[in-house]
Amino acid sequence: MPIDHDILVQTLLRDRTKLLAYILAILPDEHVAEDILQEVSLAAVRKLDEIDSAEHLLLWLRRAARFEALAQHRKRGNSPHMLDAQVLDALESHWKRYDAERAVDWADTLRHCLSKLTPYARKLIELRFAQGLTGEALASAINRKPQAAYIALSRARRALSDCLRREHSRDATS
Amino acid sequence: MTEPVNMTLEYLVDRHLDGQSTPAERDQLNAMLHDDSAARDQFVRFCIEGRVLRESLSAAATAQRSKLNLDMDTTPTLRRSRSVWYSAAAIAAAMIIAVTAWLLLDAGSKDSNVKPAPTTAVAMLSDASADAVFAGRSATVRLGQELPIGPIQLTAGTSQVMFKSGAVVDLIGPCSFELIGPNQGRLLAGRLEAYVREEAAGFSVELPDGSRVVDLGTRFSIVLTGDGIAEVRVVEGAVALHRESSGRSAINLPQVKAGQLARLSMNSRQVEILALSRVLVSDSETGRVMAFGEDGMYCGAFVEGDLAGRPLSKPGGMAQRTDGMIYLAEAESNGRILLLNSQGRVAEVVCAGDPQIKPDAVAIGPDDRVYFTDAFDSQQVYRVEDGAARVFIPKTYAPSQKLELPRGLAFDASGALLVSDRERSMVLKFEGPQSTQPGRFVGIVARLNKPQGLVVDHDRVLVTANPSRQTGLWLISPGPVRPAAVYTDSSSSPFLIDGIVLIDGSAVISDWRSRRLIRIDPNGQISDFAHGGHGLEGPTHLLRLDPISKSD
């Protein structure tokens, strides 16, 4: 039995961030990713009678997003920033593991974990994610070479990710 | 050119997501993900974390830069009870998609003049807090569900209803509300907050006695108290009040404007319109000063964006003159002291500032001059003279006596200057400007752990402090030091108080660490003071602003 539109609206509200993350993993371009998500959302409205459960909906949305991302990739002249199809296939089951997670809950925990970082690590995270600096721009903002900037950033990301994991396991056991 | 070898997964993922990876890096990432399930899991986590960070932090940065208040944006925002930090922009974007889908799916008319059938959807449940509990016919309602004409019983938590017209109503439980049309509702009990976009102007809320509150393009709240009073508070714009007379003809009551509160008695049918006091809060993280009603309702940004040619940066202490004008200190932008009018507009840059001085607390002296502390850099007290900051109390204020973290400043009833030194855990007294030896150290008034905000209330002097497991307000003069409104928490670290105001005997404090405003009543009970989608990121100093206008 097809799902009703309430489920679609709920899913689009709750899972927008994760869907964008999914699209960006395939095609790392924020503007294109937003366009793809809108296209896929509207396609889901039109195809609602073909989708029979909330789980199926998420799967359907991801599949449609991947298809659209590949189409955009081809349209843009097969830019090199693309993972292998086999790897994308292998990743699918991992994305599914996060279907029950809500991005808004992650946001709360990330905020807490950001406060635990060293000032330098926090600055890097802010330059990268608040100001959107990448590559040379990020490197020059901290007066380092690009590779050194990325290494420092990756350490900060790791510390943040570890904290997040700890907090989630604490939540799960409390 | 050297290529990185054996780079970490984090490095490779960041490079990939930035579109910066070289062919060698991409090959390495492909190989890692191909062979290692744990790496694939970490990759997915990184992608989601990165996206959450981007949406959360970029929204905060935008709020800092933008002249627009995110919560005042023309896009309806979906406020989350758990995290105001989460990107309002992202949520608004999600709403656009969701509402687009909703409208595409809906065949119903948006014309509010057409009376819909009882089963036709007139609204959608666009948000509900994690602790929201619905009852009665609405017991099974779910996020995103269309809502037909009928009651919504919210027994706990908060929820948000978006009408077909675009009007957005937050219900704060316990609340009994009824949808009666695509642009109309009825409040039967409890409280609501409405945000009505221009295209939904004319949105109306009926009250139990048949009175109607008609929006004129605004933001307002209604509270039904237990004693038959409806309080209509207008945050922005204006609302019209209509009441039917005994002959059933409508009586138009005066409009209620922003900053006013109308009290409608259901029993005596009297209407009273009052001007409201506001509480201003400096938010050091977003570079805004926000306004709240005395009851904690968020009233929008008081100051934000460019002030006198520079963006407001790290706003701090505030003080109100007897003519209603307000001094505002900035810790950055060279440490300016600005004079604002009651609408938050700059009347004058009182002190252009000095890069070596970062103003913190501000007070107005008996000589009508502005005094401020620099708690973090020079650790001195300054007086503004001829547009420049002059040292009034030097760091070494007496032999072998140094200020270490002077965070509180006030003049007592006799004109003496009181300074709280948070680091040295003492409140110090100095001769005031009108004495024969201005600035001379008089003595230690009180010793408390981490004193900060000082308040002078007639002849009483109060200070906030953080003794072990306690937080709140102590009376330090007259008489011995004793608690005035103190909260004891045996389970966690106490709040880190930055600012304080007094409201009806309670202390309202800002806790920078938890980003909350907290009311501590004289019995030591605490409650959240601020509500509404204020998005506070770093609340510091507070100021209670007296009413700016009289009732019509």
Image (cartoon, grey):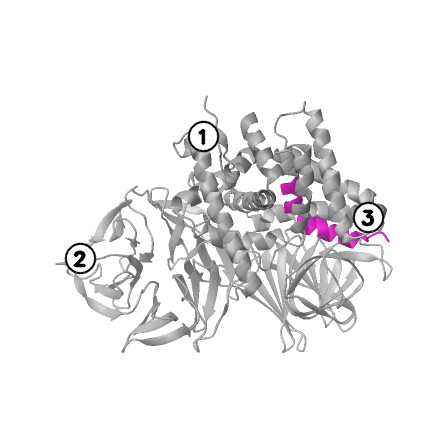
In the image: residue B111, left or right of residue B360? right
The residue sitting at the left extreme is: B399
Q: Residues within 10 Å of mark 3 (few under 14, many from 20)?
A: some
Q: Is residue A2 magenta?
A: yes
Above/below status of B153 relative to A1:
below
User: Mark 1 falls on what kind of element?
Assistant: helix
Image position, residue B217 (x, y; %): 66, 52
Discs 2 and 1 lie in a common subunit: no
Image position, residue B155 (x, y; %): 67, 71
Q: Alpha-carbon distance for marks 2 and 1?
A: 49 Å
Q: The magenta stretch spans which residues?
A: A1-22
Query: Residue A51: which numbered mark, if any?
Result: 3
* Tag 1 residue: A146
Q: Quadrant of the C terminus of chain B?
A: bottom right
In the image: residue A116, left or right of residue B248? left
Q: Is residue A118 magenta?
A: no
Query: Residue B397: which numbered mark, if any?
Result: 2
Of circles 2 and 3, the one toward us is 3
* Residue at 55% from the left image edge and 37% from the top image edge: B13
Q: Alpha-carbon distance for marks 1 and 3?
A: 46 Å
